Image: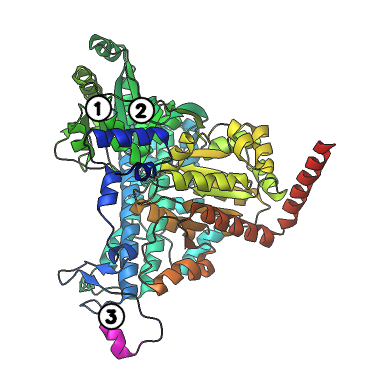
Amino acid sequence: MAENEKEAKSIDQGSLELIEKATKDGVNTAFDRADAMKPCPIGSVGSCCKNCGMGPCRVPLAKGKEETPEEKLKRRGICGATAETIAARNFIRMVAGGAAAHSDHGRGVAELFVAVAKGEAPGYEIKDEQKLLQLALDWGVEIGDRTNNEIATDIGRIALEEFGKQEGEVITTRKAPLKRQELWRQQGVMPRGIDREIVEIMHRTHIGVDQDYRNLLKQGVRASIADGWGGSMIATELQDILFGTPAPIMGTANLGVLREDEVNLIIHGHEPLLSEMIVSVAQEPEMVELAKSKGAKGINLSGMCCTANEILMRHGVGIAGNFLQQELAIVTGAVEAMVVDVQCIMQSIVTVAECYHTKIITTAAKAKIPGAMHIEFNEHDALTSARAIVKAAIENFPNRKGNIHIPDNRTDQIAGFSHETINYLLGGMFRASYRPLNDNIINGRIRGVAGVVGCNNARTKHNEGHVAMVKELIKNDVLVITTGCNAIACAEAGLMVPEAAKEFAGEGLAEVCETVGIPPVLHMGSCVDNSRILIAATAMVKDGGLGDDISDLPVAGAAPEWMSEKAISIGQYFVASGVYTVFGVTWPTTGSKEVTDFLFKEMEEMYGGMWDFEPDPIEGAKKMIAHIDKKRKALGIDKARERVLYDMEMRRELDKV
Ligand code: XCC
Ligand code: SF4
């Protein structure tokens, strides 16, 4: 590989060093595989169907002008399906995959929740009583003089029922602005039960069922709402009650959090159920003693992907990296064990680990990898599994092979900006509210708010899109809220400390950040925590002055380096909630102009939000800003901003004298 080609892989110096080390060590990574394997040009635009045994069928885009029926019949799958049907089916199957992943996570949390309430899960307890009682009020669960565990048993039961419910409306959708709920009912997309909407996608996309792309995409919307306002929201709410609602906390990020003289144990994946236990077990004196007896100075935990975000938000555990850094962490040669659960785990880490001394430990019954050690997580005896995992890591310390390189790069960050925290920081304990945020949007100091989220994608330079887009937004006075791998990219770029406001934000945003003492980019958590963004947007609506629905707000969403099906589900529920949402890298329906137009244009008339695609992150940011300005104008607050800018001009003039 040429030197300049290697440089194009990441904007992160430490990652580049390890990509080079991997090459030297003869270890192939996702970066090499992305070079070696080009994406299929037909599949990547959504035009390949393999939903039955007569296919795969590849149906190309129509060539311009109106087709005659005879011509139309030549551009079909064997079953007669059109390019529109195929693209729409593929798209909503991605929604189904993503919604299933988030919701199954939510179900797992609900199951643990019930077990904890019944006293059948030693080691866990209810940490946020206030949030428990709030949820009881929201869901109509009797409080009276019942114990927390009694209340929690009812809450857990209701939560579990939401997955298998056949009729009615998913209970958490009640959190949405009333106007939005009404709109969903009108459009026929109010989800009934979480599992039902996902199953219905699988049915409708079977050969010969739903063959009207609009009707297919409508079901995609319904399932996505069941994700964001259902399964994901249940996951976030119950996790907060069990493990504590995040509050501002200091942490560090990047591969430099690994330590040469300690046992390095990386927790990678998504569900915080087990990682919470590992965090507490790693502090037990016997474990620390055991580590010392093996010649290590201590035990160093760090996180990867969304598990990293979860344990950072609640415990300040360091973040070793995001999606594309998982193999690189092992390439350091200093990782004793990487413990994984579900989602975004590259199968190749097992083989990369074989090239060094690292142990990969799978823990979920539903997610095994051949060649990995499997220590199954059992919620009824979580401490035992957690101890076995930490021990396995410690005992592997003496097996290091030398050839260690830990990049010297780590940044500080402040995380933990849950909705409750933002509410409190802005309004104070006794009058918690979003008022100051709304006021500063109305007076123009803050132009708007952008939710920038999502993955890394090996088809584009690691972290470049994330950081370029976020910098462009904050420079233009747009406050950024973030989750997932974008949050990690921002932390690694040093955007999550209060000082970043002065350095990178526009004057208006910087002024607000300095007054409140917050960074210009607020870390709201993991992928399921995108539900926090929905709650924050709803709080902005409820506080008043910015319209009466999310679609009125000067806000936008983006996933500049997306790759997972979960990102598609998230984007779809952002759009269904009224948010303009722009994705980078690639767009999976360009094989059908009709389907793409429907998503990019018609959806705006239906939901007030729509999809867009823009591979250039700066252009993407500009489009988001243009949408924010359009909403400001509709609200009649566009003049305020001109005045603020004028004020700044005047201030600069004054500075000169
Ligand atoms: Fe996975 Fe959640 Fe994407 Fe990162 S951002 S690559 S889904 S870890 Ni949700
Ligand atoms: Fe081809 Fe139709 Fe089968 Fe899809 S469902 S593979 S388009 S025959």
Q: Which residue is mark 3?
A: 75
Q: Quadrant of ligand 2?
A: bottom left
Mark number, residue 578: none
Categorize mark 1 by other alpha carbons within 10 Å: few (<14), some (14-19), many (20+). Answer: many
Residue at horizontal 57%, vertical 48%?
A: 473
Categorize mark 2 by other alpha carbons within 10 Å: few (<14), some (14-19), many (20+). Answer: many
Categorize mark 3 by other alpha carbons within 10 Å: few (<14), some (14-19), many (20+). Answer: some
Residue at horizontal 65%, vertical 54%?
A: 546
Q: Which residue is mark 2?
A: 302
Q: Secondary structure at mark 1?
A: strand
Q: Is residue 341 above or below residue 585?
A: above
Q: Judge depth for marks 3 and 2 and give the one in front.
A: 3
Q: CA distance from mark 1 to mark 2?
A: 11 Å
What residue type is disc 3 on? Arg
Q: Which residue is mark 1?
A: 337
Q: Is residue 73 magenta?
A: yes
Give the residues in magenta. Answer: 67-76
The one nearer the camera, 18 or 180, is 18
N-terminal-most mark, 3 or 1:
3
Whether residue 593 is visible: yes
Residue at horizontal 34%, vertical 63%?
A: 91
Q: Secondary structure at mark 2?
A: strand
Q: Is residue 248 left or right of residue 501?
A: left
